[in-house]
Image: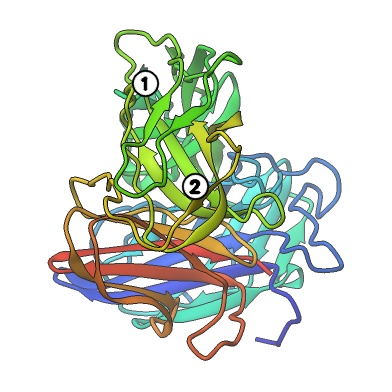
């Protein structure tokens, strides 16, 4: 593979040993990383008009005879035997992720429990709008690997790819409902057909793609940031194309909104052993929709506003105790956020900005009830991102970042920490102080018996 100045299409392969065999996880992305010249979106015909929209199937194929892409190559079957995967297609999701139409970044991995005994060689294929795209082939092996594709590594023809596949039958019995926080819609559906001829599912809201699911899934939770009732449908697909949509079902959420009359008075004095009380008018909520909110602490306002992290969340009363850090911060404000919507006002004391002293007699810690590692934000990111984790008690904690090869890149925490919600920033530097390259990174939290790993995407 030739060297490239910038990565346009990236394919990440991560393998690990499991109790059930040799586990391989495969992540794929095609995106514009902001370098010049800009990377064109995938389109029909061949980087021209008619950019492929979200939901267009991108399918994995097995070059079983190792002679390059041809009509005899099958898709890997869905299952847990040698060479089988959990799903074999995914839908483009560039618009959903904010990357734009014609780009994608997988959020779920192709998983193989065992590689095929011969020729573990694969490629990706898009067959839509009378256009056939196929990538160069790549070989999988047990052990971590990382392969990069540029635009030139896609082969494009102005005709549909040859296939013996038939379009799968449609999904049935689609049902959409709210979750208990009224911030998510849960969509369930049924599907009958040969799983070996199913790629996956695209979820549509009012006809627009809002998510996708692998071939083995029949339920998905979708975050929603609107009060409107929406009609949800499910479309099954494979390399031959999309099935007819399922029936439609209505789902909705209630987004908590704060009125302009919200009181933003912060009472309490000295932040050292005194009660800190927030007074505000609560929104009118349906009886089955509990409140969901966050309060973030910012400091160095207004010269260099910097977010420290969350100081309160989840329960809303006339009196709310806050978790303040033990560090000294100057020129602070508290920002109210709810349901992915930031209210335009802040809580403030009589001077508008308050100071946090170095020593607190009573920090008023909001105690989490369990260990937790949150998804970093923003994600994807460039060049910094924030990672939050919760400790229900004082404990030893290790928070480390690894590259896709499993090599340690940065240690953010390695020591004893107090109970509460902690927030740390990663600036994209290694332990040696050098900038790391673009790509997928894994961050892992270990505290006693609690171990959790999440992935994040660094753009350059």
When the figure is inspected, residue 366 is found, relative to residue 65, above or below; the finding is above
For the image shown, how many numbered marks are present on the structure? 2
Corner quadrant of residue 326: bottom left
On the question of residue 181 being in view, the answer is yes
Residue, x 57% and y 74% (percent of image)? 428
Residue, x 31% and y 37% (percent of image)? 275
Foreground residue, 402 or 430?
430
Residue, x 23% and y 57% (percent of image)? 419
Residue with the most extreme bottom position: 432
Corner quadrant of residue 76: bottom left
State which quarter of the image contains the C terminus: bottom right
Element marked by disc 1: strand
On the question of residue 190 being in view, the answer is no
The spot of residue 135 in percent (x, y) is 64, 67
When the figure is inspected, residue 168 is found, relative to residue 234, above or below; the finding is below
Q: Residues within 10 Å of mark 1 (few under 14, many from 20)?
A: some
Q: Which of labels 1 and 2 is toward the front?
A: 2
Foreground residue, 42 or 404?
404
Q: Residues within 10 Å of mark 2 (few under 14, many from 20)?
A: many
Q: Which residue is mark 1?
A: 172
The spot of residue 370 in percent (x, y) is 19, 49
User: Disc 1 to disc 2, how far (Cα)?
Assistant: 47 Å
Foreground residue, 221 or 280?
280
The image's colouring method is rainbow
When the figure is inspected, residue 128 is found, relative to residue 315, above or below; the finding is below
Residue, x 36% and y 80% (percent of image)? 118
Q: Which residue is mark 2?
A: 297
* Residue 310 horizontal side relative to residue 39, left or right: left
Element marked by disc 2: strand
């Amino acid at each position: 593979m030739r060297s490239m100045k910038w990565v346009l299409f990236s394919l990440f392969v991560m393998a690990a040993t499991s109790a059930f065999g040799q586990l391989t996880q495969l992540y794929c992305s095609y995106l514009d990383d902001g370098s010049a010249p800009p990377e064109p979106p995938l389109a029909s015909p061949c980087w021209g008009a008619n950019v492929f929209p979200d939901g267009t199937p991108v399918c994995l194929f097995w070059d079983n005879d190792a002679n390059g892409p041809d009509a005899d190559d099958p898709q890997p079957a869905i299952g847990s035997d040698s060479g089988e995967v959990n799903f074999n297609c995914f839908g483009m999701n560039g618009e959903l992720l904010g990357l734009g139409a014609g780009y994608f970044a997988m959020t779920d991995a192709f998983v193989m429990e065992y590689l095929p005994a011969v020729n573990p060689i694969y490629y990706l294929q898009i067959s839509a709008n009378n256009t056939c795209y196929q990538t160069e082939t790549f070989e999988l092996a047990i052990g971590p690997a990382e392969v990069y594709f540029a635009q030139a590594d896609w082969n494009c023809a102005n005709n549909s790819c040859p296939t013996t596949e038939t379009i799968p039958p449609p999904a049935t019995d689609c049902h959409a409902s709210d979750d208990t926080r009224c911030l998510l819609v849960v969509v369930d559906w049924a599907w009958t057909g040969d799983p070996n001829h199913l790629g996956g599912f695209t979820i549509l809201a009012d006809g627009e793609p809002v998510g996708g699911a692998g071939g083995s899934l029949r339920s998905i939770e979708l975050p929603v940031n609107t009060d409107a009732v929406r009609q949800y449908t499910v479309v099954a697909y494979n390399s031959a194309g999309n099935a007819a949509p399922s029936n439609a079902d209505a789902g909705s959420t209630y987004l908590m909104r704060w009125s302009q009359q919200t009181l933003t008075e912060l009472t309490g004095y000295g932040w050292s052993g005194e009660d800190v009380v927030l007074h505000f008018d609560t929104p009118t909520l349906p009886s089955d929709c509990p409140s969901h909110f966050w309060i973030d602490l910012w400091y160095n306002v207004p010269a260099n506003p910097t977010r420290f992290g969350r100081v309160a969340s989840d329960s809303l009363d006339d009196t709310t105790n806050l978790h303040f850090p033990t560090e000294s911060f100057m020129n602070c404000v508290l920002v109210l956020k709810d349901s992915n919507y930031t209210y335009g006002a802040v809580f403030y004391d009589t001077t508008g900005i308050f100071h946090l002293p170095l020593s607190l007699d009573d920090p008023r810690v909001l105690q989490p009830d369990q260990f937790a590692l949150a998804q970093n934000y923003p994600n994807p990111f460039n060049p910094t991102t924030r990672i939050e984790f919760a400790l229900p008690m004082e404990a030893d904690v290790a928070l480390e970042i690894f590259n896709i090869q499993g090599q340690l890149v940065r240690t953010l925490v390695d020591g004893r920490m107090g109970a509460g919600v902690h927030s740390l920033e990663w600036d994209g530097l290694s332990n040696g102080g050098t900038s790391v390259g673009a790509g997928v990174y894994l961050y892992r939290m270990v505290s006693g018996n609690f171990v959790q790993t999440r992935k994040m995407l660094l753009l350059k």
